[in-house]
Image (cartoon, rainbow, N blue to C red):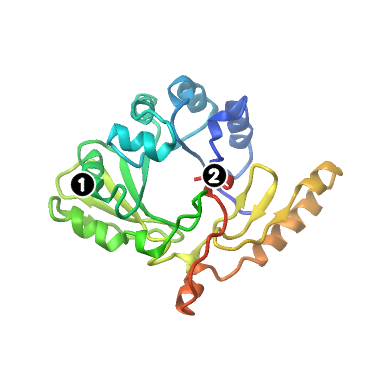
Amino acid sequence: MGVESIRLSGGEPLMRRDLERLVSMISDVSGIRFIGMTTNGLLLPDKAAALKEAGLQGVTISLHSMNPERFTEITGGGNLEAPLAAIEAALQNEFNPIKINCVILRGLNDDEVMDLASIAFSSELTVRFIEFMPFDGQQTWRFEKVVSGDEIITRIRKRYRLIPLPRERSSTARVYKFLRGKGEIGIITSVTEPFCSDCNRIRLTADGKILPCLFDKSSYDLRPLLRDGASDEELSRLMRDAVARKPPGVQTLLKQHQSLQHVRPMYTVGG
């Protein structure tokens, strides 16, 4: 049906048994050009080689702080060494691209923008700064906590010369390269400057539901059809119907001056 790119997320995708077998099955599907994964990186060093051999191409690793104590606070007990080891494993196994996701919250980790940007400056990685969205499990989202993409870029430009790259159609990020650095900076402005007008994404949750839009509560359950032995034609019909019902998105809500509300925890739909 025209899907060419698959991203495995979660929850945490590396918790799935035999994940490399799933990757291999996806890579065997005709027309699939790219398979990526978003992960917290905890189990990546042990599984990177097998995943690369199975067909995984790109890896995105979540890293929201370079301060060990703050990292533990943000992740509820995590160890900063885990994502750092995952980044090293991704580099050693030559995944491409390798991206680092950083959600920036005002008053929590916005003082680390320069430290995180320096990772991209000195390594051939893309560090992506993501605006805080209303998908936190504790429902603490407030617009006042959002650090806009424009503010982040302004801060980085105080130290580094950045050159904007052309935006690829349907891309979530504005991407910049350094004038003299190795990597790139990505800015994902889902709150202040959404990309709804050319969004071509659709999600399948771990419990079998299709989500046409992250900012909409509608979902379409594939499980009854799968468990009743539905034909490919029936599955295709439900998928196409879900895509046809894709709402205008957050961009329209903002234009209508509607306030954003908590939608769902991000861990239920992946990173």
Which secondary structure, mark 1?
Answer: helix
First in sequence: mark 2 vs mark 1: 1
In the rendered image of this protein, does residue 24 appear above or below residue 157? above
Q: What residue is shown with label 1? A: 114
Q: How many marks?
A: 2
Q: Residue at x 75, y 57 (%)?
A: 238
Q: Nearer the viewer, residue 171 or 127?
A: 127
Left or right: residue 140 compared with residue 18: left
Residue found at x 60% / y 68%: 247
Residue 30 point in image, percent of width and height: 63, 42
Amino acid identity at mark 1:
Met
Quick check: 229 above or below 214? above
**CA neighbours of label 1 inside 10 A, class few (<14), some (14 to 19), many (20+):** some
Residue 169: percent from the left, percent from the top? 43, 61
Is 162 left or right of 110, judged from the image as shown? left
Question: Mark 2 packing: few (<14 Cα in 10 Å), some, or many (20+)?
Answer: some
Query: Circle 2 is placed at which residue position?
Result: 267
227 or 167: nearer the eye?
227
Q: Which residue occupies 54% across, 41% down? A: 9
Q: Is residue 92 visible?
A: yes
Q: Secondary structure at mark 2?
A: helix
In the rendered structure, the answer to whether residue 86 lies left or right of residue 26 reads left
Kind of residue at badge 2:
Tyr
Q: Residue furthest top?
A: 46
Percent of width and height locating residue 16 = 60, 30
Q: Position of residue 7 (x, y in %)?
A: 53, 43
Q: As drawn, which residue projects farthest toward the right?
A: 228
Image-based side of 112 in relation to 48, left or right: left
> Is any part of residue 61 visible from this angle?
no
What is the C-alpha distance between the residues marked 2 and 1? Answer: 27 Å
- Nearest the eye: 187 or 66: 66
**Can you say which quadrant of the picture contains the N terminus?**
bottom right
